[in-house]
Image (cartoon, coloured by chain):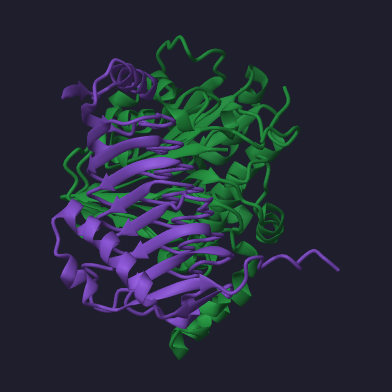
């Protein structure tokens, strides 16, 4: 295991160091003192594991293709932007547009997330991106979602606190969203409907929540004891007739 | 020189600010460190700061920070100032040589108090008299521009990366209880010294990341209240809107925020009757001050700061606190850079203002 002290390094220098260590066969890196350096793990192909201590900058794991990254802290905007494969485990919060255009791989977030999480996620053949959020989510959750799976757990909510903001899944036309508990109907975008998860869905949720609980040392049974709702789009092409006369 | 608005470049930007609510004053080196962390959000075409509590020895005088492109404009403005004010002190704004900063304009400051006879002549309040003078300089004196005009505060701005601008203006030699900062990445308009943030009026200062798509509507509304929009940068209208709403129309800052980032009608419809009535009235009366488009801003004023996002939250904003200090910034890392062990971090919702004010005791002590 190789330890890199990121304190004071520019994002270019830090990412060059990470890349060259990975290229030279190191499979486990620990990055300490990270604060705001962007693009960590961006575009990296292949296997390997990064542990990050601190707050990594925007676009962590953007276009990433295979690494496992575990962050002991909060992350900033755009984590997993257009990510293709791999796993990101975040022990803190994530901000806006986590999983932006994500097309594969998995992101697990213990805390809350900001606005527009999962915006324009997509799935293709065997690629099915997954984001699991332990806390609550901001507005436009799953906006323009085209594929993949979002799971929102709402753990540790204060009494009266909403699990998700407004305009949920506005423009959604593919994929699925699971939310633990109920969501006021006015929060939902007009392109989605809430249904009861099927038995097959329940089975998948067990696996997904099982992984989540393992990463963060929680009890899956307790989380699964509360029923989920499932959001799916009414229509694969909600705007198909918008500009057609 | 082609100025703002004469041509268009398509902005990212960085904002950061903090307030010590107990009134303790610290020098400018930490705000520089914070804004410098987000260097990728700027491109060297603008950086600036506003600081509150920096002129305790002149706290009862308006501190006019001015920039002049030539001596002619300086002479013209000095004549105006002598006509209208008693000048307690004046000097060049101290700067130091910084390699990255080239060709600075002339930078002067005047500590002034308006002549009573002139205020009477104008039949205006003292503050309105001041704002009219600021507008007059900006609009009528070619090559002169008022950088700030409040009491016991000052703005420092120019073309360059914010850390270089901070070094240039020797901000490490000023002590303030609140600091706000901006790193500019001009997208719609070119960078020039007057076009850097913050934009100010009296003791209001605004730093802004984003763009005001409703600029035309906002501008027309403000012009009806005698604001002269001369700087051709959208942020200017935010400073004047806050001045109109809070100073002249006496709205609480919290409500002024709900004018700038008004709740959606659907949201208003779900409110209890009294609030529904209030927000409906606000939207009806001040619909033209709604700021459309993506923004995150920090507003500085005597005794406080306010951070605000557009209601769709199309720009980043993070808040944090430790002890008596409230921090706000575009990125969490910019806060942790100067306060690694924050006690609380939170992510304000779109349209939800984050306000930090001096505690009453500190307010009294600083103004005594």
Counting from the top left corner in percent of width and height, residue B262 is at 53, 68
Left or right of residue B303, residue A221 in this image? left
Counting from the top left corner in percent of width and height, residue A6 is at 25, 24
Image colour for chain B is green
Counting from the top left corner in percent of width and height, residue B356 is at 30, 55
Compared with A45, B164 (above or below) is above
Asked whether A151 or B254 is in front, the reply is: A151
The residue lying at 40 percent from left, 38 percent from top is A58
Q: Quadrant of the N terminus of chain A?
A: top left
Image colour for chain A is purple
Asked whether B155 or A32 is in front, the reply is: A32
Left or right of residue A241, residue A152 in this image? left
Q: Quadrant of residue A17?
A: top left
Do we see residue B160 in this rendering?
Answer: yes
Asked whether A139 or A212 is in front, the reply is: A212
In this view, the residue farthest toward the right is A245
The residue lying at 76 percent from left, 68 percent from top is A241
Asked whether A187 or A122 is in front, the reply is: A122
In this view, the residue farthest toward the bottom is B273
Counting from the top left corner in percent of width and height, residue B114 is at 50, 44
Q: Quadrant of residue B191?
A: top right
The residue lying at 27 percent from left, 18 percent from top is A25
Do we see residue B325 in this rendering?
Answer: no
The residue lying at 33 percent from left, 52 percent from top is B304
Left or right of residue B284, residue B42 in this image? left
């Amino acid at each position: 295991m190789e330890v890199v002290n990121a304190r004071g390094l520019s994002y270019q220098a830090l990412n060059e160091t990470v890349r060259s260590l990975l290229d030279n066969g190191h499979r486990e890196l620990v990055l300490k003192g990270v604060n705001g350096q962007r693009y960590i793990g961006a575009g990296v192909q292949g296997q390997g594991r990064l542990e990050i201590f601190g707050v990594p900058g925007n676009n962590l794991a953007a276009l990433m293709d295979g690494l496992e990254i575990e962050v002991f802290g909060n992350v900033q905007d755009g984590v997993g932007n257009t990510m293709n494969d791999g796993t990101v485990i975040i022990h803190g919060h994530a901000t806006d547009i986590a999983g932006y255009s994500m097309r594969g791989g998995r992101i697990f977030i213990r805390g809350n997330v900001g606005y527009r999480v999962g915006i324009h996620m997509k799935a293709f053949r065997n690629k099915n991106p997954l984001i699991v959020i332990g806390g609550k989510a901001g507005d436009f959750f799953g906006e323009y979602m085209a594929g993949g799976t979002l799971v929102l757990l709402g753990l540790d909510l204060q009494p009266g606190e909403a699990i998700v903001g407004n305009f949920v899944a506005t423009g959604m036309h593919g994929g699925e969203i699971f939310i633990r508990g109920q969501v006021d109907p006015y929060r939902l975008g007009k392109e989605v409907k809430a249904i009861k998860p099927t038995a097959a869905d329940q089975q998948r949720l067990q696996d997904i929540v099982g992984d989540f609980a393992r990463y963060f040392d929680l009890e899956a049974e307790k989380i699964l004891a509360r029923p989920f709702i499932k959001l799916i789009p009414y229509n694969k092409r909600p705007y198909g007739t918008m500009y057609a006369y | 020189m082609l100025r703002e608005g004469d041509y268009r470049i398509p902005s990212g930007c960085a904002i950061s600010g903090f307030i010590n609510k107990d009134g303790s004053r610290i020098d400018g080196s930490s705000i520089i460190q914070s804004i410098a962390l987000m260097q990728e959000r700027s491109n060297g075409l603008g950086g600036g700061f506003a600081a509150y509590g920096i002129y305790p020895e002149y706290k009862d005088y308006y501190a006019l920070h001015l920039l002049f492109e030539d001596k002619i404009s300086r002479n013209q403005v000095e004549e105006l100032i002598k006509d209208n004010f008693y000048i307690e002190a004046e000097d060049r704004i101290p700067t130091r040589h910084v390699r990255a900063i080239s060709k600075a304009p002339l930078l002067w400051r005047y500590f002034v108090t308006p002549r009573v006879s002139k205020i009477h002549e104008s039949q205006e309040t003292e503050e309105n008299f001041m704002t009219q003078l600021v507008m007059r300089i900006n609009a009528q004196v070619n090559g002169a521009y008022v950088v700030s005009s409040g009491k016991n505060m000052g703005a420092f701005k120019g073309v360059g990366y914010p850390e270089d601008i901070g070094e240039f203006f020797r901000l490490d030699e000023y002590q303030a209880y609140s600091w706000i900062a901006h790193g500019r990445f001009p997208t719609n308009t070119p960078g020039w010294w007057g076009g850097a943030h913050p934009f100010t009026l009296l003791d209001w200062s605004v730093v802004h990341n984003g763009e005001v798509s409703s600029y035309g509507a906002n501008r027309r509304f403000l012009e009806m209240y005698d604001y002269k929009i001369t700087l051709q940068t959208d942020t200017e209208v935010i400073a004047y809107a806050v001045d109109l709403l809070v100073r002249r129309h006496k709205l609480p800052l919290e409500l002024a925020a709900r004018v700038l980032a008004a709740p959606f009608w659907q949201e208003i419809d779900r409110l209890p009757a009294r609030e529904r009535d209030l927000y409906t009235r606000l939207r009806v009366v001040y619909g033209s001050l709604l700021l459309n488009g993506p923004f995150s801003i920090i507003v500085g004023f005597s005794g406080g700061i306010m951070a605000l996002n557009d209601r769709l939250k199309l720009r980043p904003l993070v808040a944090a606190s430790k002890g008596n200090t409230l921090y706000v910034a575009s990125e969490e890392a910019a806060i942790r850079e100067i306060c690694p062990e924050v006690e609380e971090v939170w992510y304000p919702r779109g349209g939800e203002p984050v306000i930090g004010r001096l505690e009453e005791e500190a307010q009294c002590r600083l103004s005594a």
